[in-house]
Image (cartoon, rainbow, N blue to C red):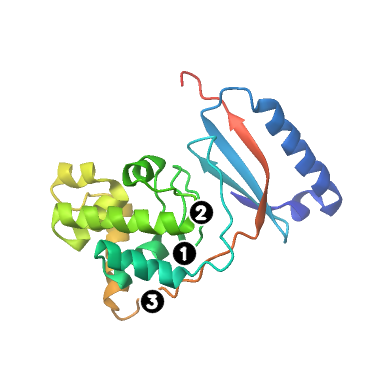
Amino acid sequence: MQANIEQIFGNRWRRWIIAALSAVAGQLLGAGAAQAQVIEIADDGTAQVIASSSAAVAVRRVPAGFDIDAEFASAARRYQVDLGLLRAVAWQESRGHSNAVSPKGALGLMQLMPGTAAQMGVDPRDPASNIHGGAAYLAQQIATFGSVPLGLAAYNAGPGAVQKYGGVPPYAETRGYVATIMQRWSGAPGAVQPALKLAQPHVRTVATLLIEVPGE
């Protein structure tokens, strides 16, 4: 959800709104929340509400001097994944945003779920660790299912879904995901090659609204 605070409320209300949101977040911190809403406001006044699956999720800024090309190349060599394929997956997942958080709680460049990151032994909030975790998980899925398309399907929908359907699951999102990445990776006509540049998070978190979920 995105909106421009100045357009909706006028510039003179912006500071008050931020203060109010921060106060509400502070009051709710002890509520035993199971989910969180992180509100970020960019320098241009754009506000974005990012849902996450855990109130403990924190976004880290990219370390100074971080070389995204070198990190992808290193991860591709280490886990024997084609570099072009790895970059195509990262492009599809986050467009190079190290602070990307999906509504389901997937984190970072490679959009790792916290459970997957723990399984791979990586910190999803650290860009380098996130890239290596994604490469390792992708390599694992390709090896398990014996092909790149099925590995991509498992990366997107989960290995259980691929096993259940004996192939790419009949989900529109997953089929589009696999087709788009395969086209981009193969350099097919019309494919947009991913010239990844690390997207710096030009935002600041002004409030984390913790929402208690009954029964959890």
Q: Is residue 110 visible?
A: no
Compared across the picture, whether 61 is left or right of 83 comes to right
N-terminal of the pair, mark 3 or mark 1, is: 1
Q: Residue at x 83, y 54 (%)?
A: 11
* View extreme (top): residue: 215
As drawn, the label of residue 100 is 2
**CB-based contact (under 8 Å), mark 2 and mark 1:** yes
- Residue at the spot x=19%, y=47% of the render? 162
The numbered disc on residue 193 is 3
Please indicate whether residue 29 sits to the left or right of residue 120 in the image. Answer: right
SS at mark 1 in the image = loop
Task: Indicate the secondary structure of the residue bearing disc 3.
Answer: loop
- The amino acid at mark 3 is Gln
Could one spot residue 53 in this view of the protein? yes
Q: Which mark is residue 151?
A: none
Residue 94 as seen in the image, left or right of residue 185? right
Mark number, residue 95? 1
Q: How many marks?
A: 3
Q: Eyeballing the image, is 137 above or below 74?
A: above
**Relative to the observer, which residue lies in front, 29 or 104?**
29
Q: Residue at x 23, y 53 (%)?
A: 140
Residue at (46, 21) in percent of width and height? 216
